[in-house]
Image: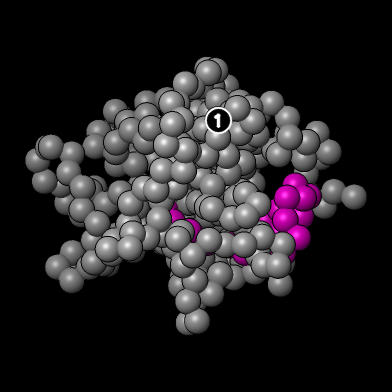
Amino acid sequence: MPRYLSQEQIDAVPVCNRSYLVIPGFLSQSQTNSLLSRSKQLLDEFSIEDHPMTKFTTGEDDHPKDKAVNKIGHALHELDPEFQKVTLKNEDVKNLVRDIGMHKDPVALQSMVICKQPEIGGEVGPHNDSFYTDPPTALGLWFALEECTASNGALSFIPGSHLTSPISKRFVRLPQGGTGFEILLPDYKEDIKGEYLMETPLTCKPGDLVIIHGAVLHKSEKNTSQRTRFAYTFHAIESPPYAKYDEKNWLQPTTAMPFSKLFT
């Protein structure tokens, strides 16, 4: 018997023609405000000089750090109490993942805040989120911390593309060091069929949750507005012995920080 979702919502995620689902108001106003406030505090407090950054450029003038950082991650649910409460200690999250039924013993990984800065928050092109497990098991949970609109980079999807667009590449640790893409289907020529759709009215409100099947194609446009578009996201995958996590994946657990189980 479903614990959080309706049967209609459950059916929407893994098997129907959409493969994504929007849950309005999943986080309370208090939870949403706490995550947003903590995100901005982290931006204010970190030191640029000694931080191991991945740098990118917009080709524009320099911006203050709180208006320039693209992401904060990738272990917020492990290292920060505010994000841990919403991720690992949230009964609604646990019940929702149980209801969807894609996992027997899921673990959480790759938690991050995506800042999508005003005017410089770049387009994220069509992609899927599947970490390479055998079999594929990735499920994304994406929480809007601010209003998301067409002008500041709302998500859009090709419904049903998890059934028609194979995973042709993945982000891996390279043998020579660093990370990069491994091509899984060398002869595959992407021919995207279908139309990208946004949820009417092209908006997610603060606290809304978007559930994303790991293989569905989605994207977000450049932030052309004067407003940030903060969102918190993490992924759930199946753990052994139910699925094998590939040793090539760019993100690897360690003895000191293994992937945390969701259902404990």
Give residue 162's position: percent from left, percent from top: 61, 33
Q: In this view, does 194 lie above or below 16?
A: above
Residue 27 visible in image: no
Report the amino acid beneath label 1.
Ser
Q: Which of 25 and 50 is in front in this view?
A: 50
User: Magenta includes 123?
Assistant: no
Q: Is residue 122 above or below residue 72?
A: above
Query: Which quarter of the picture shows residue 10?
Result: top right
Residue 221 visible in image: yes
Relative placement, left or right, of 168 versus 54 is right
Q: Is residue 82 above or below residue 144?
A: below
- For the residue labelled by badge 1, is the local secondary structure a helix, a strand or a loop? loop
Relative placement, left or right, of 166 versus 149 is right
Characterize the local packing of mark 1: few (<14), some (14-19) or many (20 or more) Cα atoms within 10 angstroms.
some
Relative placement, left or right, of 186 versus 17 is left
User: Magenta includes 94?
Assistant: yes
Q: Residue at x 24, y 37 (%)?
A: 120
Q: Which residue is drawn at 13% across and 37% down?
A: 59
Give residue 147's position: percent from left, percent from top: 46, 36
Q: Which segment did they paint magenta?
A: 93-114
Relative placement, left or right, of 98 versus 197 is right
Q: Which residue is drawn at 54% across and 22% down?
A: 197
Q: Which residue is drawn at 15% across and 47% down?
A: 63
Give residue 72's position: percent from left, percent from top: 36, 58
The C terminus sits in image quarter: bottom right
Query: Which quarter of the picture shows residue 176?
Result: bottom left
Give residue 115's position: percent from left, percent from top: 35, 47
Q: How many labels does the image show?
A: 1
Q: Mark 1 points at which residue?
A: 165
